[in-house]
Amino acid sequence: MMSPPPQRSQSFAGEEPEVVHINRLPDELLLTIFTKLNNARLLCICSLVSKRFSTVVHQTSSLFLTFPHRHSNDLNENLPKKLFNYLSKSFFRKPLTNKFDGPLFQSAVDSLKSFENVRTLQIQLPSFQQDESILKWHAEFGKDMNICVILFATSVHQPTPSTHQVRNSDTLLTNHLLQSRIASANQCFREATWRQHILRHVVENHRNSLHAAEICDSSRKGKVVMRGRQQLNDLLDPELKLPASGYGKLWHVQLLRLPESRCLLHGATVVAIRRTDENEEEHEDVGVKQLMKKGYELDEQLLWEVLTHIFENHAPSKSLNINPARR
């Protein structure tokens, strides 16, 4: 790409016009800057600066799109949650169509269509999970993998000499704690499947260029990840449906020391949920070890360290039966 000759801004009579130095930058350097910028909203604004900016901006290969919480004048009305429920119901209960009329969401999706070279895409939606004991969750869906892993903890501390023993009764896996965490895990899994359907609506416009996509929550606690062309093709396959039945396992450790993360988890619980066909053989680890072989991002180091420790040292505390998806 060739950079255009430097332009001079307008000036008052008798004054030397000022050179617009950014126009001296070659297109390759501008593209590098825009790629680092990454934010879809800001990139759309930059594309309005000039025709040249518009051309270069839309060659960006990495995009981040966020849907912030919206505030209502009515304190009793939770607009972000209503918007999310509307989106999830539309995707979860009806066939996906191009006539989907969620104004805010559809407007954002349309604004991305002009980005034709997107290889990686990240979307952030508001988080509606109320259980503060959830530390991290990770979900992946596809033809060979439909799994969600959720990490809970009653508390997280830096280890000290006085924390060598468990003294907090809240770390015991009581029936109340068990039922509470199973309910939160099921809700987390359902929200992950909703996000998967929302992600499908976005990536279908970039099926020829996209290599990786994820949709996370605004609390940065978890994400649905689609890695590689095969998972993305599975996501867009209209014949591929999430199995209605499945199983899960729960692990609980009263006191868990994590040397790499340098933290101490009281009442640590891991719930892994996997939806499968009825004839698939159950795995002792619910297939999480297969998931872990793919690697992880830095923001998921805590989750992966917990999984590694638990699978090496602890047997499941509870097996779970997954009911058909609620409609």
Image (cartoon, rainbow, N blue to C red):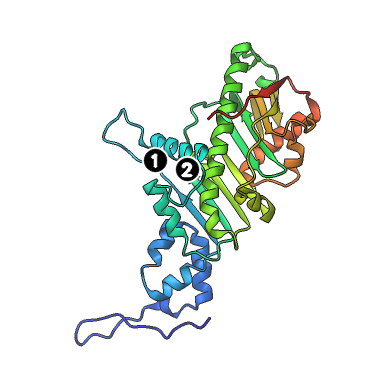
Is 308 placed above or below 48 here? Answer: above
Is 200 placed above or below 158 here? Answer: below
Residue 69 shows which numbered tag? Answer: 1
How far across and how far down the image is residue 11, in percent?
A: 24, 81
Q: Which residue is mark 2?
A: 125
Please name whichever residue, 306 or 73, is drawn nearer the observer in this view of the structure: 73
| Whether residue 221 is visible | no
Instruction: Determine the secondary structure under disc 2.
Output: strand
The type of residue carrying mark 2 is Leu
Characterize the local packing of mark 2: few (<14), some (14-19) or many (20 or more) Cα atoms within 10 angstroms: many
The structure residue drawn at horizontal position 66% and vertical position 21%, both measured from the top left corner, is: 163
Characterize the local packing of mark 1: few (<14), some (14-19) or many (20 or more) Cα atoms within 10 angstroms: some
Residue 8 shows which numbered tag? Answer: none
Image label count: 2
The structure residue drawn at horizontal position 60% and vertical position 22%, both measured from the top left corner, is: 181
Q: Residue furthest bottom?
A: 14
The structure residue drawn at horizontal position 57% and vertical position 38%, both measured from the top left corner, is: 193
How far across and how far down the image is residue 33, in percent?
A: 50, 67
Q: Are marks 1 and 2 in contact (CB under 8 Å)?
A: no
Q: As drawn, is 181 to the left or to the right of 251?
A: left
Please name whichever residue, 129 or 101, is drawn nearer the observer in this view of the structure: 101
Q: How far, Cα to Cα, is label 1 from label 2?
A: 8 Å
| Whether residue 11 is visible | yes
How far across and how far down the image is residue 50, in percent?
A: 37, 73
The type of residue carrying mark 1 is His
Please name whichever residue, 280 or 282, is drawn nearer the observer in this view of the structure: 280
Q: As drawn, is 314 to the left or to the right of 4?
A: right
How far across and how far down the image is residue 135, in percent?
A: 58, 32
